[in-house]
Image: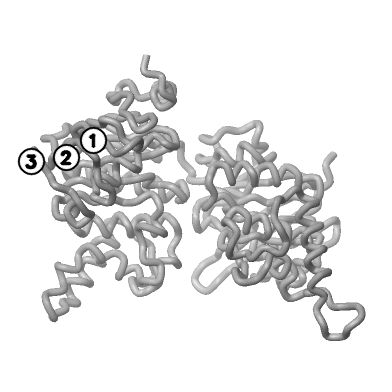
Amino acid sequence: MTETILRMTGICKGFPGVQALKDVDFDLAAGEVHALLGENGAGKSTLIKVLGGIHPADSGEIVINGQPLRIRSVHEAQQAGISIIHQELFMVPELTVAQNMFLGREPMSSRLPMVLDGAGALAAAQALLDSIGLEITASARVGDLSLAQQQMVEIAKAISFESKILVMDEPTSSLTSKETDTLYALIERLRQRMAIIYISHRMEELFRISSRVTVLRDGRYIGTRETAHTTPDQLIELMVGRKLQELFTKTPTEPGEVVLEARNLCRGAKLQDVSFSVRKGEILGVAGIVGAGRTELMRCLCGIDGVDSGEILVHGQPAAIKKPKDAIQLGIAMVPENRKEEGLVLCGSVGFNLTLEALADFIHGCRFDARTERRIIAEYTRRLSIRAASPDILIEKLSGGNQQKVVIAKWLASRPSVLILDEPTRGVDVGAKAEIYAIIDALAREGVAIIMVSSDLPEIINMSDRVMVMFHGRKMAELPRTDLTQKMIMKYATGDSQ
């Protein structure tokens, strides 16, 4: 029987006005990857912060290797063999890999008092990197490394503490598929020397690398399942308390006239002779695998990139879209795939971000209409159920789901007739997905023409009236709702036109 190296029992933690954890249980076996799953606000981060000594538990017991411990600081957690790699990496870009790995505990020279042993640190860091198969030079400047490489350095740093328990919080959220595969391979090697608690919203990850999954909801322990003996639908039901099909809100509608039409759009090898249309009140799904040209097509529709040839019509009239401002004036809005880099001003407040596309409504020359600004913020905060303590707090303080709703609200405030949604639920939890689906459905009922690009096939199938499938810059098929199956979409998405 596998040895249990960590057992957390009856963990409770409260903050003013909220009980974050209520009698939560969790255990971890030697050499396993145990996934921790739950919506934003479920208590995952609080539980990990209790384990890592950031927040002391109000009650409950933590037992590591059979010894009850009271962890009251990060230092005590590290002494107990616990390391946490947070979603936001804590690295000093100007320092080397070795300097970052031993920051605050630099080895001292054995010959010269009060002198750091730089050569010793460099050698120790390189030996550690080599031992876990990382092709990273210890003398390299961290700021010159890719995000994936920086994450690997964080893992090496955790190993340098001789940690036995490693917590990884959303480790692949900013990685490419190739970088993610590299991380998976490293995790497999790490299982020989430590146990891993893995936090992620991505179901495919959990089923690929974890042996068990524990689900939290509203600060409570809901259950633990062996990954091999459960399904994504069952885990989602545990997370949100309802079945998967209940997450999707799709009201049957009768689409109106054509709002936007593209004819034979070409852009180098990215787009080749693409034609389609979308109608008032219709949700047109756009599916395809990486490199299909979906995002490239959307960028052309919004004037971010130009086309080599072809024509775009809006309300039946040829449209000259040379820059984003042209598209906005024609009523075309786009929620981008990467909200943090392309959709939000992270140093700005919730209210500032929400009203960016509605400035003309309350700024008239030198006159500023604060009442109208407050009305717009209040209206869209209520309409999209944006959970923010105040419109004045920084947008980066919100959860991914609420950030995404702010991006959508920003464009809705411009009153678009065409709304393009590029991966609208990427990086948000299941509960927030359900809320975003309800928003999309309501917009379609109000007559907005919606183009939804998504790699999530259940999302595409359950939310679309029609689906256009692309492959290598070409339109391969256009499928009615009655023909929408994962098998049919993947058939065309992989280039099979027969």
Considering the image in quadrants, where does the C terminus appear? top left
* Measured Cα–Cα span from mark 2 to mark 3: 8 Å
Above or below, comparing residue 461 to residue 82 in the picture:
above
Contact (Cβ within 8 Å) of mark 1 with mark 3: no
Helix, strand or loop for disc 1: strand
Contact (Cβ within 8 Å) of mark 2 with mark 1: yes
Q: Which residue occupies the foreground of this view, 314 or 439?
A: 314
Query: Farthest residue in the bottom direction?
Result: 114
Task: Report the residue at 12% width, 45% height from top.
Answer: 319
- Drawn side of residue 178 relative to residue 7, left or right: left
Helix, strand or loop for disc 3: strand
Residue 111 image offset from top left, x and y in percent: 92, 80
Q: Amino acid at mark 3?
A: Gln
Q: Which residue is mark 1?
A: 265
Task: Report the residue at 36% width, 62% height from top.
Answer: 344
> Which numbered dot is residue 317?
3
Q: Which residue is mark 2?
A: 312
Q: Is residue 402 visible?
A: no
